[in-house]
Image (tube, rainbow, N blue to C red):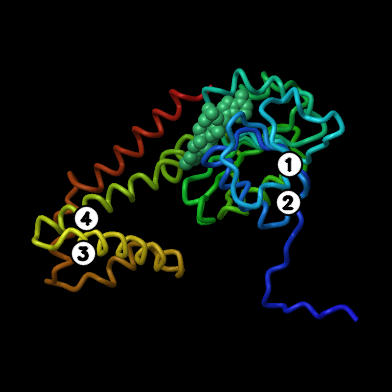
Amino acid sequence: MPAKRDPALPVKSALPPILLVGCGRMGGAMLAAWLEHGLAPSVVVDPVPRLPPGAEAAVTLAAAAAIPVAFAPAAVVLAVKPQQAEGVLPAFARFAGSSVFLSIMAGRTLGGMQAALGPNAAIVRAMPNTPAAIRAGMSVACAGPGVDEAGRRLSETLLAAVGRVAWVEDEALLDPVTAVSGSGPAYVFLLGELLERAGIEQGLPADLARLLARRTIAGAGALLEAGEEDAAALRAAVTSPGGTTERALSVLMDERAWPSAISRAVAAATERSRELSG
Ligand SMILES: NC(=O)c1ccc[n+]([C@@H]2O[C@H](COP(=O)([O-])OP(=O)(O)OC[C@H]3O[C@@H](n4cnc5c(N)ncnc54)[C@H](OP(=O)(O)O)[C@@H]3O)[C@@H](O)[C@H]2O)c1
């Protein structure tokens, strides 16, 4: 008699075969997550791949020319550096029409990739972020013309393995997405650095300042993630009239301080993302 499945245990969904092009920081993190989800035998193309543990089941090749003719991936995931795209993409054009392409390359547009992969290529362009390495990522995806429901679903499944996924219809929105969630982890890391430094300036031992800064950011982030409340409501809830938080916020919320700096930073990153697009 088959054992009864414990409903509390997650079901391991088998993923179809994937061709991963570029197995660096982000490609490697995604591969690690897919392997945990039961990835079917797949192929990785990268001259020096950063293979995660358990990746032995995947065939690793240095170049596209070595891919077995019979290999039929359900998706070709493009995870090389954007500046490598031009030289790399044409070698994968033969999969157009039979696989969906999922690109995580920053700034490489659907139109630019279509020109390299051919008119039949069904391409999803996505922007993940670094917390993907611990399955806490945020990806935003945009489907190009010709992506069918199955291609969209598979792309969503592959991205969801490393975090949350949202879709946009308008590709131009990927520039502000890049500025908010793509570059965003760096802004939070900067806050960590500055909070730690300010704690030391106020007399805290360095290791305690570091611990407080890190745990405060991680804990506040978890609190924000856990509830439905707006960030502004959570902020108000910890701000007693006349107290210490209110005094600090009067500095940070001065119109020339954080409200203006964050807005200018995101505008500058959006502008840079547009400049780099092609
Ligand atoms: N890291 C992030 O937070 C993040 C966030 C959003 C989007 N992305 C995007 O993800 C992509 C990868 O970024 P990453 O940080 O993972 O970069 P990475 O660590 O440099 O990974 C790229 C990998 O591709 C390999 N490669 C180079 N030429 C190749 C070729 N001809 N065929 C196959 N593989 C080749 C590289 O090998 P070598 O090192 O030997 O050159 C490297 O292992 C980028 O397009 C980036 O825009 C990254």
Disc 4 to disc 1, C-alpha distance: 42 Å
Residue with the mark numbered 1: 18
Amino acid type of the residue tagged 2 in the rendering: Leu
- Would residue 81 be seen by someone viewing this image from the given angle? no
Disc 3 to disc 1, C-alpha distance: 45 Å
Amino acid type of the residue tagged 3 in the rendering: Leu
Crowd around label 2: few <14 · some 14–19 · many ≥20 (10 Å): many
- Report which quarter residue 97 is drawn in: top right
Find numbered disc 2 in the image and state the secondary structure of the residue it sits on.
Answer: loop
In terms of sequence position, does the residue under pointer 4 or pointer 3 come before the other?
A: 4
Residue with the mark numbered 4: 195
- Report which quarter residue 240 is drawn in: bottom left
In terms of sequence position, does the residue under pointer 3 or pointer 2 come before the other?
A: 2
Mark count? 4
Q: Which of marks 3 and 1 is in front?
A: 3
Disc 3 to disc 2, C-alpha distance: 42 Å
Residue 80: x and y in percent read 57, 31
